[in-house]
Image (cartoon, rainbow, N blue to C red):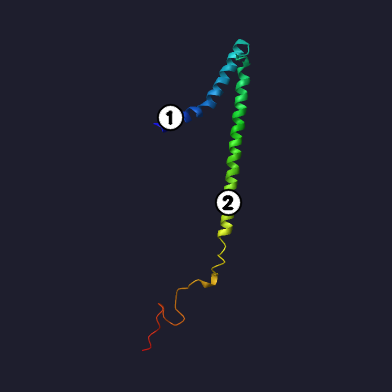
Amino acid sequence: MRIGRIQAGVILVNKIPGMVDTLVAKTRAWEEARGITFIYDGVPLLVMLDEYAMLRQEREEEKRRLKDQKNFSEQQNIEQEATFSSRPSPARASGTKKVSGPRANGGSNGTPPSRR
């Protein structure tokens, strides 16, 4: 039930920019038809809506910048991990690796060859 309310809220919030654009268009048409400025709470409505649009754009740019910064930081961490993890461990030399195949004593499974 709670998730449904959250989803409904997200849907409404996502509709706000379109609603603002529609309101701007209708307000302009109203002002042109009447030849006067639409005033809301003593302030021209278009000025209010323009300020809202600028603030929204600034917030979106800030979100984008933070996301890019986070992605860059994560990429650097991945590259750093790859750089440090690709080196062989100093405790284990690369020449100590066991090699499968014939043994020095002739047996392939570690037993000496029969002398019959």
Secondary structure beneath dot 2 equals helix
- What residue do we see at 62% from left, 24% from top? 51
Front-lying residue, 104 or 29: 104
Q: CA distance from mark 2 to mark 1?
A: 37 Å
Q: Which residue is mark 1?
A: 5
**Residue 32 vertical position relative to residue 81 in the rendered view, above or below:** above
Q: Position of residue 38 (x, y in %)?
A: 60, 14
Label 2 or label 1, whichever comes before in sequence order: 1
- What residue do we see at 60% from left, 32% from top? 59
**Residue 67 vertical position relative to residue 18 in the rendered view, above or below:** below
In this rendering, position of residue 57 left or right of residue 6: right
Q: Which residue is mark 2?
A: 77
Front-lying residue, 33 or 44: 44
- What residue do we see at 43% from left, 29% from top? 5
Outermost residue toward the top in this view: 34
Count of numbered circles in the view:
2
